[in-house]
Image (spheres, helix red, strand yellow):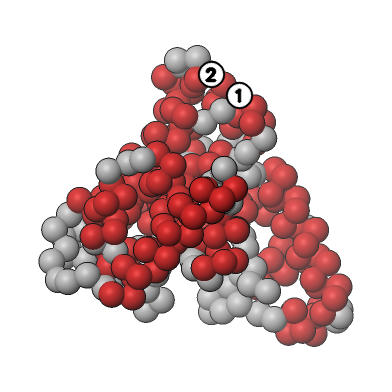
């Protein structure tokens, strides 16, 4: 009960943090690089939602609670703010997502998991590692993440983690190989859990704020497509079309238009609003 109260209080704190536009994000990042602590703090606070979003990709265990995952993610967020260059053409949320996941995974690896190594996961890591090293030797460069995924048919997150570990020649790579089941045992769990419910409430609240200047019909389309209505169920294009007496294609165009608008105005929305094909 105490842990739940801590989580709820933290969620409330995060939900009160002001959002920033892409323009504000770049300006804060530039000032943070110049040593402005207030800008650094504001950029961190504005992206605490991103940490929660990524944290729910991992399953807590006896040693690592959901709040531990979040705190490890926050460490990665701080590192991302310190290293981010706003003039390189990469959005901060995409840049920070990598550092957040790395920090969370390293937090798991440092804890005492117990149990044996997953043979399948160890083999997957070895295949990715061997491919990267062979590719580097033949092509005199490291492969891109997409090249690894195409060849090995592995998860993008695994390719990124192993590649970064090799590039940095970090000793954590050896730990990763020895404890490959650490990642496998903490992959997304789609069963009900209160952390996801609470996190979804933050998403709903943020989306409601972002949709305040969108017309009522378009706002309704987005809320129904992403399950933000009362039943929390996502509606199909055809279902929504029937409600508005429009074709499924017309609804798809409305959805596309609104999402493009939101992503232009708030870069972090691309993390929240991603429809499955």
Label 2's element?
helix
Q: Residue at x 46, y 52 (%)?
A: 133
Q: Residue at x 31, y 50 (%)?
A: 173
Q: Residue at x 49, y 21 (%)?
A: 32
222 on left or right of 144: right
Residue for badge 1: 27
| Number of residues whose C-alpha sits closer than 10 Å to that of mark 2, classed few (under 14), some (14–19) or many (20 or more) | some
Residue for badge 2: 31
Quarter of the image that includes the N terminus: bottom left
Label 1's element?
helix
Give above or below for 246 relative to 186. below
Quadrant location of residue 224? bottom right
- Pick the front one: 220 or 158: 158
Q: CA distance from mark 2 to mark 1?
A: 6 Å
Quick check: can you spot residue 201? no
Residue 84: image location, x then y, percent:
52, 31
Residue 113: image location, x then y, percent:
16, 63
Residue 258: image location, x then y, percent:
75, 57
68 on left or right of 152: left
């Amino acid at each position: 009960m105490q842990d739940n109260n801590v989580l709820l209080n933290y969620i409330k704190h995060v939900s009160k943090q002001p959002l920033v536009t892409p323009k504000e994000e770049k300006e804060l990042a530039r000032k943070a690089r110049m040593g402005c602590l207030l800008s650094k703090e504001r950029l961190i606070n504005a992206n605490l939602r991103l940490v929660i979003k990524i944290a729910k990709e991992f399953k807590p265990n006896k040693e690592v609670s959901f709040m531990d995952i979040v705190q490890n993610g926050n460490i990665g967020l701080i590192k991302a703010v310190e290293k981010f260059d706003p003039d390189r053409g990469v959005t901060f949320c995409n840049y920070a997502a990598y550092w957040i996941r790395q920090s969370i995974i390293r937090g798991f690896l440092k804890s005492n998991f117990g149990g044996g190594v997953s043979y399948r996961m160890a083999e997957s890591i070895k295949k990715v590692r061997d491919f990267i090293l062979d590719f580097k030797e033949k092509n005199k460069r490291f492969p891109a993440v997409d090249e690894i995924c195409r060849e090995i048919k592995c998860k993008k997150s695994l390719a990124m983690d192993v590649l970064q570990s090799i590039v940095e020649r970090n000793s954590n790579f050896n730990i990763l190989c020895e404890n490959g089941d650490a990642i496998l045992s903490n992959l997304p769990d789609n069963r009900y859990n209160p952390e996801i419910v609470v996190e979804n409430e933050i998403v709903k609240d943020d989306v409601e704020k972002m949709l305040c200047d969108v017309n009522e019909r378009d706002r309704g389309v987005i809320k129904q497509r992403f399950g933000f209505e009362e039943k929390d169920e996502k509606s199909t294009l055809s279902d929504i079309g029937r409600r508005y007496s429009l074709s499924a294609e017309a609804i798809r165009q409305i959805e596309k238009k609104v999402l493009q608008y939101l992503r232009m105005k708030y870069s972090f929305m691309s993390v929240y609003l991603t429809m499955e094909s």
